[in-house]
Amino acid sequence: MNSKLDLIIVSSIKLSQTLICWLMFKKFSPSSDVAGHTPVKSSVQRAIRGTVLSQWKIESETLEAIWPKKEGLVHVKCREHISIYTVHGEPLLFQHFDGPLYPTLRILHKYPYILPNVKVDRGAIRFLLAGAHMMCPGLTSAGGYLPPADEALPAGTPVAIYAEGKEHAVGVGITKLSTEEIRNVNKGVGVETVTYLGDDLWVQNSL
Amino acid sequence: MAPRKSRNREPSPPPAPAETDASPQVEPTPPVQVLYCSVCSYPPEYCEFGEHLTRCKQWLHEAHPDLYEKYYSDEALQAKIGTLSLQAQEKLEKDTAKKEAKAEAKADAALKKKMASQITIKRIERNKRKYVTTVHGLEAFGVDLKKVAKQLASKFATGSSVTKNPQGQDEIVVQGDVSDEILEMIEDGVGLLKGIPTDNVELVEEKKKKGTE
């Protein structure tokens, strides 16, 4: 009994932490949450470019098309260590603290192959669009999709969240468990939603 | 200008390797063109989860009949129901309808509020013969204050800026007494000031408080 209670407490603490960390754009308004715009130093830009190339499945030529070398990146600093990087005011990628770089959903729609995919079933779409994290059963059920065992993703990988019967991605998330674990445990949060269709980052066409 | 030059010089080493990179002629993969609904900004396949389904449907029907057929024809609907239990589907539809009604009510209220909001043009005496003019409340009509300030500045050839007033709200401050001209501009709907109802505009004069006389 006691241990169960402990577990609940621990998990609730964990949950609250993750909520602070990852539901970044559920409430976000440029007027109150943006601390400032700064052009990024070219050396830092080079570093970011390198990270992007290593973290996303993208060729340097394609990256060049999205983000030409000549165009300076602008760093939009937001509350709670969120950094959004924009080119010509259009948000391209964002990052929480020193975490992985995520593409914005619009970029992901244009270049759908840059992140590994997971898919949720139709019942989950409604909740995803309200900003919920994706629970394991939604990913393992008939309508869902997880990469096969030989391409299993470790925990903490940015993924594109697709939806059953839909062509385009509906959100960007980060795996909380490895995909194999999601299959085996099949309970609780499997993928944490970072940004989703219709959230306040999606609404911002330019920053 | 000077720092820009130096920045240009700094990354000059990387372009060289980039060119050699490009020599194997790897073409950048073109982006996928995604159509977005002009009503709710989602890709049309997600409209059903949005707040304006009826309007989205109407738009898609007019703009892209083929896609409309794809997403809302009977077969498509049948296929969708197949994956969900009937009950869940019903619930979803109910939810959507509810959401839609809510969104509509919200939009109505917003419009009403917008129509009721006041614009104050205030002439403030600065120094007996000198005035500044402040325009307050324009942001309720969805105009970009910064751009309007710029427009006013170029129109009157004076300084014009967006500042926060003591209440912490943004307002436009224009140097010189141009209150009548601004009123006229709003009436005529020049440039960015289009579509602002004139009834809500109010002219106020503010004398400098004691001490000058």
Image (cartoon, coloured by chain):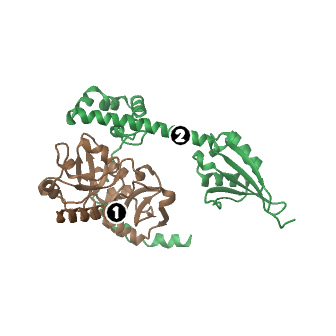
**Residue at (35, 70) in percent of width and height:** A47
Q: Quadrant of the C terminus of chain B?
A: bottom right
Image location of residue B183, percent across then percent down: 73, 45
Quarter where residue A49 is shown: bottom left
SS class of the residue under badge 2? helix
Q: Which chain is green?
A: B
Quarter where residue A44 is shown: bottom left
Task: State which chain disc 1 sits on.
Answer: A
Q: Which chain is brown?
A: A
Q: Amino acid at mark 1?
A: Cys
Q: Looking at this view, is A26 or B64 the one in front?
A: A26
Residue at mark 2: B109
**Residue at (41, 64) in percent of width and height:** A83
Residue at mark 1: A21
SS class of the residue under badge 1? helix
Image location of residue B71, percent across then percent down: 31, 32
Q: From the viewer's perspective, is A119 left or right of B62? A: left
